[in-house]
Image (spheres, helix red, strand yellow):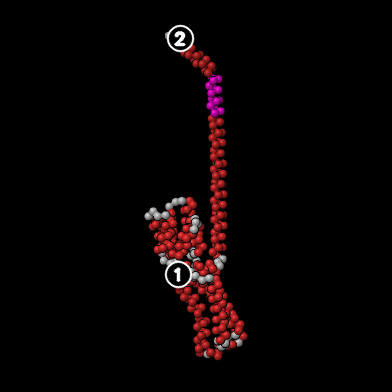
Amino acid sequence: MIVGLLFALLVAVSLGALTYAILEPRLQTEKNARSRLGLYKQSESEANAKRVARDRLQEVAKRRKSIQSSLDELDGKQRARNRHTRNLSIERRMTQAGLKLSMRSFVLASIGLGFVMMLVTLIMGAPLLLAVGLGFVGGFGVPRWALTFLRKRRQKKFTEEFANAVDVVVRGIRSGLPLNDTLRMVAFETPEPVRSEFARVVEGLQMGLSMTEAVERLYQNMPLPETNFFAIVVSIQSQAGGNLGEALSNLSRVLRERKRMKGKIQAMSMEAKASGAIIGALPFIVGFLVYLTSPDYISILFTTSMGNVVLACAGFWMSIGVMVMRNMINFDF
């Protein structure tokens, strides 16, 4: 019995060894094939990963180049806009000030004012040089100062009403009206000077200008940070799409916050402005009081050439001091 079992075991082992000897080359071949296939797949995956990484780097570089070119283009446009809004002609300043005068009328009025001031100064017995200087100031400086004053006052009124005009545009867009109709509503329902400026935008749209060009004209006619923000928002939304009502609503909130902050800063700087005004007016007040009490003592400044030189030097240095104080207490927004 035991002998039979041993014989059977030996037979089984022999058959297994024979089977392994026969199948081992094939198994080794399949193993090598699987190993080569794994190495091929690994090399292919690495090549794909390198290709994907290379494509991703190229895409990032291309996007970076596109963004840089866009930024350069925007920077160039902004510089051109700044040059256009800074180097203003007299006609453009009169338009921004709301004056309906021709250049000829402005020049004639300036010459007439300068001649009158020179004539009055000569009648009062002042020297010819002083009269000519005051005539030049009256003909060249005073009209331009008045034009700048009227321009800034109109821009201030525009800033106070511009946030309300943006709110009208937002409500119109949210109610389903197109942007052209909302701008037309602003041009008819808002007070001056917002009404006239938006009327020009509507006229530009009716003449065939695009929305971007029309709002750009608004910034050119009223060069303020608020109109610049409005032009940028409308231009971006018209080109890229999106929720224009939400963007203009955020812009309206920003404009109101700017207005509130500007009021706070002006309130905090009123003490410094009052001090500067008192210091600037003090020499004139003292000179007038001295003239009332001792006119012969101070008349030397007006009747002698040396006195005129002293007055000119004092006026020059006082102008510098006033400009320094003005720059110290004025803030840009």
Q: Which residue is mark 1?
A: 266
Q: Secondary structure at mark 2?
A: helix
Asked whether 97 falls inside the magenta stretch, the response is no
N-terminal of the pair, mark 1 or mark 2, is: 2
In the image, what residue occupies the spot 55% across and 22% down?
29
Q: Residues within 10 Å of mark 2 (few under 14, many from 20)?
A: few
Magenta span: 24-37
Q: How much space separates mark 1 and mark 2, taking CA atoms?
A: 118 Å
Viewer-nearest residue: 316 or 130: 130
Q: Where is the N terminus found, in terms of image quarters? A: top left
Residue type beneath disc 1: Gln
Mark 1 or 2: in front is 1
Residue 291 marker = none
Q: Is residue 250 visible?
A: no
In this view, 111 is above or below 40: below
In this view, the residue in front, 58 or 93, is 93
Residue beneath label 2, please? 3
